[in-house]
Amino acid sequence: MQIGLLILVVLGVMFLSSMIKVLREYERGVIFRLGRLLQVGDRAYKGPGLIILIPLIDRMVKVSLRTIVMDVPPQDVITRDNVSIKVNAVIYFRVIDPAKAVIEVEDFLFATSQISQTTLRSILGQAELDELLAQREKINHELQNIIDSQTDPWGIKVTAVEVKHVDLPPEMQRAMARQAEAERERRAKIIHAEGELQASAKLAEAARMLSADPAAMQLRYLQTLVEVAAENNSTTIFPVPIDILKIFMDRKDK
């Protein structure tokens, strides 16, 4: 008698566990009744909260509405300028229609991953290497729009796509390093030439001012002599202008 009662209790617990389901706030349940999708009002899913199912008749598939972060494996890409690179990315998406995510595609996670990989190779293959490195935001936005349009029939919304890493071949890295070094040398030469041009203009202006007053030139020589003598030099060689000697010669003649 007790064994039969225990069996009934166990069967009752199993019956209730298969009949009563609790869905979390971020979960929705797509219910199939005798194989057909159960429409609940204007929705084809239930939840969150307590869900009552008919055992052996209803079957529920739980779908999470949280944002899913999926890593796209590195893809071999040949850019438009024939550079072979490896690129990986990350995609952010979420289910907005649980019924479509269950009915329209067998495995929406696998399908989204595959469409992301093929789209990544296709879009990056149409761009040049410089464009890929300099216009990352534009390419990310284009990838998001294309993947979102292809996954929309599955009830999936792609919120963001980010290209994470571009792996360049070693010879291309060396070529880019030489290019960057040459660019820096070109800028340094231009800056040096501009400095020389400005210095020559100032020197020409100073020469005109000094030539207008001979005494100023003599004072400049004397100031230079003071600056040279300030150093710890045992011998100081200083050029004496002819104009200074001319003054003394004129005085001697008088």
Image (spheres, rainbow, N blue to C red):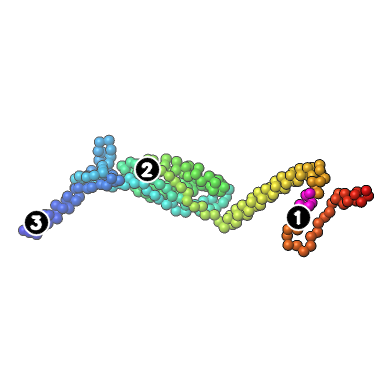
Q: Residue at x 91, y 48 (%)?
A: 250
Magenta region: which residues? 219-225
Q: Amino acid at mark 2?
A: Ile
Q: Amino acid at mark 1?
A: Val
Q: Residue at x 38, y 42 (%)?
A: 157
- Which numbered disc, 1 or 3, marks the residue closer to the eye? 1
Residue that carries the numbered disc 1 in the rendered image: 226
Residue that carries the numbered disc 3 in the rendered image: 5
Residue that carries the numbered disc 2 in the rendered image: 156
Q: Which residue is at the far front? A: 254
Disc nearer the start of the sequence (1/3): 3
Q: Amino acid at mark 3?
A: Leu
Q: Which residue is at the far left? A: 1
- Which numbered disc, 2 or 1, marks the residue closer to the eye? 1
Q: Residue at x 64, y 51 (%)?
A: 184
Q: Is residue 2 magenta?
A: no
Main secondary structure along the magenta-highlighted residues: helix
Q: Is residue 204 visible?
A: no
Q: Secondary structure at mark 2?
A: strand
Q: Is residue 221 magenta?
A: yes
Counting from the top left corner in percent of width and height, residue 143 is at: 46, 44
